[in-house]
Image (spheres, helix red, strand yellow):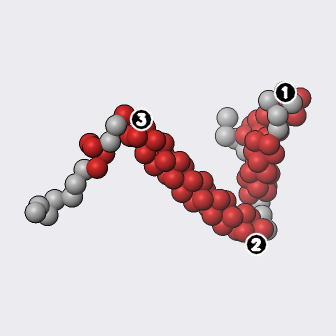
Amino acid sequence: MSDEPLDLDRHRGMSEQKAVDLRRALAEAESHAQELRQRQAALEGHLLANAAVSWPEAAAKARYLLNLYAASLSEHDTRHRELIASVLADFSRLSGED
């Protein structure tokens, strides 16, 4: 008997291996999504708990909210997308980021 682990992937057929790969990819994606939700919750808690002390900090909060809103828009809502892009460009220009 060998102490080395058995590579079960080598013994699977192509369709079984594809199914395993898909399950692994889904599990990894779900893990990343959960980590993202946790980081977003921590960020939002920080944004709620701390008042902005300058215009750039207030603009950073507004950027975050505008990006969340933009992500929820349908692809056909070009008017709101253009407005958001315009406001974000204004923030960049006024803060000297251009």
Identify the residue at the far right of this view: 79
Where is residue 9 drawn, in percent x and y? 31, 45
Name the residue type under label 3: Ser
Residue that carries the numbered disc 1 in the rendered image: 76
Q: Which residue is mark 3?
A: 15
Q: Is residue 37 above or below residue 77?
A: below
Q: CA distance from mark 2 to mark 1?
A: 35 Å
The dot on residue 49 is: 2
For this orientation, the residue located farthest to the bottom is: 49
Q: In terms of secondary structure, where does tag 2 sit?
A: helix
Secondary element under disc 1, as helix, strand or loop, is loop
Q: Mark 2 against mark 1, which lies toward the viewer?
A: 1
Image quarter (top left, top right, bottom left or bottom right) of the C terminus: top right
**In the image, what residue occupies the spot 86% across and 30% down?**
77
Q: Position of residue 60 (x, y in %)?
A: 73, 52
> Which marked residue is nearer to the observer: mark 1 or mark 3?
3
Q: Badge 2, how many Cα within 10 Å: few under 14, some, many 20+?
A: few
Q: Earlier in the sequence, mark 1 or mark 3?
A: 3
Displayed quadrant of residue 72: top right
> Residue visible at 14% across and 64% down?
3
| Residue type at numbered disc 1 | His
In the rendered view, does 26 fall on the left or right side of 77?
Answer: left
Q: Residue at x 38, y 40 (%)?
A: 17
Looking at the picture, which amino acid does disc 2 mark? Ala
Report crowding for label 1: few under 14, some 14 to 19, many 20 or more residues within 10 A (C-alpha).
Answer: few
In the picture, measured across the screen, residue 17 lies left or right of residue 77, that is left
